[in-house]
Amino acid sequence: MGESSPTPQPVCAQEALDLLNCVTASPFDQDKCLRLLHSLRDCVQAKKVKKFTLKEQNEGEVDSKSKKND
């Protein structure tokens, strides 16, 4: 029972990460990045993703809202 379940990855995380790493690569390979963009687009359409957010953005929003209520 002591096993912890693996943390689930966000939807399309690998596709998004691959694309981000592609655009930072030197030399820039536009054709490769375009293929990765299409891969990410296919994933978000298949999974019906509406919007991406970063964890830090969400925490900042919660912190700023809670400070306003103090």
Image (cartoon, rainbow, N blue to C red):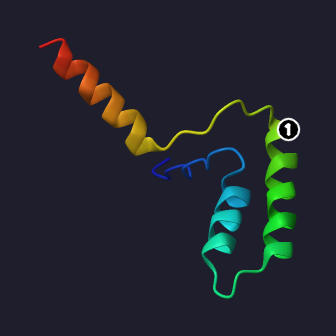
Question: Looking at the image, which residue is at 72% across and 49% down?
Answer: 12
Question: Looking at the image, which residue is at 85% across and 38% down?
Answer: 45
Q: How many marks?
A: 1
Q: Is residue 27 above or below residue 39?
A: below
Observer-nearest of 19 and 28: 28
Tell whether 58 sits left or right of 9. Answer: left
Q: Which residue is mark 1?
A: 45
Tell whether 48 sits left or right of 17. Answer: right
Q: Position of residue 70 (x, y in %)?
A: 11, 14
Q: Secondary structure at mark 1?
A: helix
Observer-nearest of 27 and 51: 27
Tell whether 70 sits left or right of 29. Answer: left
Q: Residue furthest top?
A: 69
The image quarter in which residue 36 lies: bottom right
Amino acid type at mark 1: Gln
Question: Looking at the image, which residue is at 80% across and 31% down?
Answer: 48
The image quarter in which residue 47 lies: top right
Q: Position of residue 39 (x, y in %)?
A: 85, 57
Question: Looking at the image, which residue is at 79% across and 53% down?
Answer: 40
Q: Position of residue 32 (x, y in %)?
A: 83, 74
